[in-house]
């Protein structure tokens, strides 16, 4: 009479064990599936990362090749080579390098020299930026200058030390957009606009209105605020147009100058003597005045000696392309100039020293040259150009670029997972130098 309950109990236990085992098995399967999914996603992310990294490495290699073997007769060769290396297929992944402008999306990196370096801007230049006010312009200049004397509406260390979370101003050139946002009165929206992650690309979240941050107008055009106009990355100097170290006229001999620039011995002597004896000599002096005028300022002309010949266009172009004047060789490189070959025509609106008529003439002449401006002497062909204007322009613009900002997006083809790397690459020296890296 007692076997039936026992059998029922045993049956119940067996069923309970089966149910429990099934539940455990389900949990194990779900956990295993979750782990497998996480593992696949992690592997996909690694694959996407290395694809993005491959894009950066390829761009770096193209820059170094262009630096070692430049094309002195075509200002756009390196740009075209970088654009040609802006996409690639790997085993299970791809990479693409692009950037967005108001006119659309373009392959290749951003030329940092196509924008104005904020560390070169004057008060009048700064006042042309959207939403700029006099107090913010003064504060930016105070942040950059080395002294502790505030401008009329500016701010120095005392202001920043009095904040709830105090910090010190750099009192040196600004190094990033994020640092610019630390300056008194600078709103991040002014700096970033719709490009909230500062990657230079119109992302979906930056083109969907109020659906997701940041706020944008969903017009399919990237409004990048000040970051579309200014840069902190560009660097002056670098190797010459022929790929050699620039000849420092403060240390060079006359024979070196003659060999690099194809000037005569007499011309080389005046050039070297002027730089040696004139402590404030700058390269634009050779544009603004003739060699005879420079010789007269240092009293180098001998009575009855023949007048030294002026530099012809070829000699002047070579002098400006191949030589430099650096008195403090330990000083850091100066902020970069604007590349007149790659900048947008509208960028001149933010340089009030270049009037609209001259800006239009510059762009018209550039458009007429398939190879662009390869020598500063080429700028003499611009209508309305004279020596004083050319000298002033030399202090503002350059013909070749040292720094490029590469945003490389790697994509795993199996899952669609993407990894993005944004890096600034400086090719002013060999090997090229990676200045900053952001991984998203």
Image (cartoon, rainbow, N blue to C red):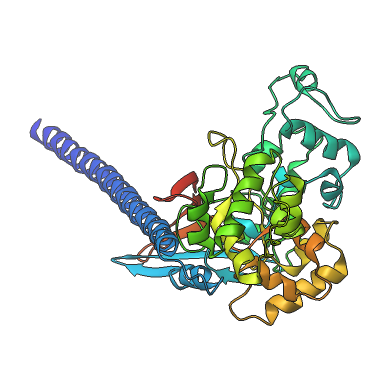
Above or below — where is 238 with respect to 157? below
Residue 116 vs residue 430, the one in the foreground = 430
Residue 145 location, quadrant: top right
Q: Nearer the viewer, residue 216 or 125?
A: 125
Quadrant placement of the N terminus: top left
Residue at 65 percent across and 70 percent down: it is: 313
Quadrant position of residue 348: bottom right
Q: Position of residue 247 (x, y in %)?
A: 51, 51
| Percent position of residue 205, x then y | 63, 57
Residue under the image location 45 percent in, 73 percent down: 84
Identify the residue at horizontal 53%, vertical 74% (top origin): 73
Is 210 left or right of 89, judged from the image as shown? right
- x, y (%) of residue 81? 46, 71
Q: How many marks?
A: 0
Residue 64 shown left or right of residue 183 in the figure = left
Position of residue 273 measured from the top left corner of the image (x, y, whole percent): 62, 46
In this rendering, position of residue 201 left or right of residue 243: right
Q: Nearer the viewer, residue 334 or 129?
A: 334
Q: Up-down: is 159 above or below 192?
A: above
């Amino acid at each position: 009479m007692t076997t039936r309950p026992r059998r029922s109990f045993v049956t119940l236990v067996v069923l309970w064990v089966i149910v429990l085992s099934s539940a455990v098995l389900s949990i194990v399967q779900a956990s295993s599936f979750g782990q497998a999914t996480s593992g696949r996603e992690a592997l996909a992310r690694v694959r996407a990362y290395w694809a993005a990294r491959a894009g950066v490495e390829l761009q770096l290699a193209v820059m170094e090749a262009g630096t070692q073997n430049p094309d002195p007769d075509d200002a756009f060769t390196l740009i075209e080579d970088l654009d040609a290396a802006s996409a690639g297929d790997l085993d299970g992944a791809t990479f693409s390098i692009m950037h967005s402008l108001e006119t659309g999306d373009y392959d290749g990196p951003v030329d940092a020299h196509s924008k104005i370096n904020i560390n070169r801007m004057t008060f009048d230049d700064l006042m042309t930026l959207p939403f700029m006010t006099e107090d913010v312009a003064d504060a930016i200049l105070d942040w950059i200058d080395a002294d502790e004397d505030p401008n009329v509406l500016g701010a120095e260390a005392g202001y920043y030390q009095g904040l709830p979370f105090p910090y010190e101003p750099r009192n040196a050139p600004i190094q990033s957009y994020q640092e610019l946002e630390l300056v008194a009165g600078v709103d991040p929206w002014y700096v970033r606009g719709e490009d909230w992650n500062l990657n230079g690309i119109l992302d979906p979240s930056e083109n969907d209105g109020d659906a997701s941050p940041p706020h944008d107008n969903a017009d399919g055009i990237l409004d990048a605020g000040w970051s579309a106009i200014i840069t902190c990355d560009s660097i002056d100097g670098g190797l010459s147009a022929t790929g050699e170290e620039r000849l420092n006229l403060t240390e060079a001999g006359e024979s070196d100058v003659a060999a690099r620039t194809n000037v005569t011995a007499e011309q080389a002597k005046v050039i070297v003597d002027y730089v040696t004896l004139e402590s404030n000599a700058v390269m634009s002096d050779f544009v603004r005045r003739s060699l005879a005028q420079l010789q007269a300022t240092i009293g180098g002309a001998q009575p009855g000696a023949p007048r030294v010949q002026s530099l012809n266009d070829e000699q002047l172009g070579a002098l400006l392309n191949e030589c430099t004047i650096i008195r403090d060789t330990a000083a850091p490189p100066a902020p970069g100039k604007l590349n007149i070959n790659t900048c947008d025509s509208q960028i001149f609106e933010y340089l009030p020293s270049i009037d609209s008529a001259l800006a239009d003439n510059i762009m018209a002449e550039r458009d007429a040259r398939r190879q662009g401006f390869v020598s500063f002497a080429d700028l003499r062909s611009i209508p309305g150009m004279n020596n004083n204007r050319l000298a002033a322009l030399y202090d503002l613009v350059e013909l070749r670029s040292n720094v490029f900002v590469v945003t490389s997006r790697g994509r795993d083809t199996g899952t669609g997972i993407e990894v993005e790397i944004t890096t600034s690459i400086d090719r002013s020296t060999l090997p090229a130098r990676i200045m900053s890296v952001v991984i998203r």
